[in-house]
Image (tube, rainbow, N blue to C red):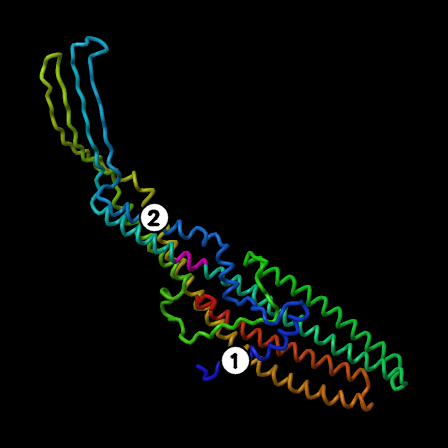
Amino acid sequence: MYRKNPLSWLPGALLALSATAACAQNVPTTAPSTTLKQAFDAAWTHQPEALAENMRLEAGHARRLSAESWTAEPPSIEIAGKTDQLDRNEGGREFEVGITVPLWLPGERSAAGALAEAETRASTSRSLAAKLRTANAVRNAYWEWQRASINADLARARLEKFRDLASDVARRVKAGELARADQHQADGAVAGAEASLAEAESALAAALLGVRALTGSTTLKLAPGNTSLEPEPSAPLDSERPDAQHPVVSELLDRSEVARRAVTLASTQRRANPELTFATTRERGAFGDAWQQTVTVGVRIPFGSESRNRASVATANADAIEAEAQLALERQRVLGDIEAARSRVKSARAQIAAAERRSQLAGESRTFFQKAFRVGEVDLPARLRIELDAAEADRQLSGARIEFAAAISALRQAMGLLPE
């Protein structure tokens, strides 16, 4: 990796733009602005998966407790009475109290426990995958907002330069050094810069609303010009099996495991659960007879049926096959996204070097032509052309720096890493 952090230049490069934008929008420069991680944390709290996360964990805990019980279903109690009071009324009485306990089928209890554990893990991985999807939406909106912020800052700075130039041209026209046509060209350049600024500020407002729509709050301090830097991943993702490292792949892996456990459980449930019955009976034949008490112990064993659970076994097998196929596809997609993101980072790094060289040359040319224009060695069209070229070079450099930071963020997203 690199000895020096490649993002170390961004805070200094954007400091002036941050101050300009903050002053323009009456936002104090000392006010803390929202970072990418803060925006993600705010957005996650409003997601349906986050709101239901605790309930899903509670449901998984309940399933585990159910699988750990000694009976397949809760026991049931039966109370019955028999009397001849309504017809003969000879004193015949019979009372019976019994309890029925459903029993596990062979292998059913362990299969149910394994399924409950797999479903709990799947709930956790589902939440992590949902976090990653939320992070993707927040990252896209955040960097779009940053691009719009930089464009608005540059448009504002270009307007100021053209206004200064137009003021200088007006002074020289009044002194008779330049023609009125030059004044029209300078004023036209100012009007064009004003239109560009209005367009850039409209795009900035739309991007800002996009971030606020995700975070669900309008009280966040989204000061334009703030760039939330993410560290570049140092350890590569395992290219052979990214299962335990990537939330999306882990989610599909756990779903596949749930499907396999469901197949195992369905295969054991080929009949209804047997029942063990304990009952006691107290009876007498007529008035004056002694009460007799008996105890009954019985077992109810239902017959099995191959067609009874065929549908459930087939459905579980279909879910397992689908999950396995989707898992294989997702692994390939993840690896492809990582390679594409690495290429993007490499390209963005090269673009920064080229943009810095162009910006340096354009700045030097601007200085030369400013001096030459003041002494009358170049005309106004050439001066405007150089100014536009320098402004475009500044825009390209700022955009390249934002794109590099966004490329790092996209690489982290492809590797399944949440904002930091």
Which quarter shows the N terminus?
A: bottom left
Nearest to the observer: residue 258 or residue 409? 409
Outermost left residue = 290
Q: Where is residue 193 in the image (x, y as percent from the top left)?
A: 75, 72
Q: Where is residue 278 in the image (x, y as percent from the top left)?
A: 16, 32
Q: Where is residue 54 in the image (x, y as percent from the top left)?
A: 40, 52
Give left or right: position of 331 versus 109.
right
Whether residue 290 is in magenta: the answer is: no
Give left or right: position of 300 versus 126.
left
**Circle 1 — which element?**
loop
Assign the magenta stretch its main secondary structure: helix
Q: In the image, is residue 358 above or below residue 324?
A: below
> Which residue is the site of mark 1?
8
Identify the residue shown where x is 63% and y is 72%: 150
**Mark 1: few/some/many CA within 10 Å (<14, 14-19, 20+):** few
Q: Where is residue 225 in the image (x, y as percent from the top left)?
A: 61, 71
Identify the residue shown where x is 42% and y is 65%: 332
Label 2 or label 1, whichever comes before in sequence order: 1
Q: Could you say which disc has been placed on residue 152 in the image? A: none
**Mark 2: few/some/many CA within 10 Å (<14, 14-19, 20+):** many
Instruction: Say which quarter of the image contains residue 251.
Output: bottom left
CA gap between label 2 and label 1 equals 53 Å
Give left or right: position of 140 versus 371.
left
Q: How many marks?
A: 2
Give left or right: position of 234 versus 43.
left
Q: In the image, is residue 202 above or below residue 255?
A: below
**Amino acid type of disc 1?**
Ser
Which stretch appears magenta?
A: 125-130
Q: Could you say which disc has been placed on residue 316 in the image? A: 2
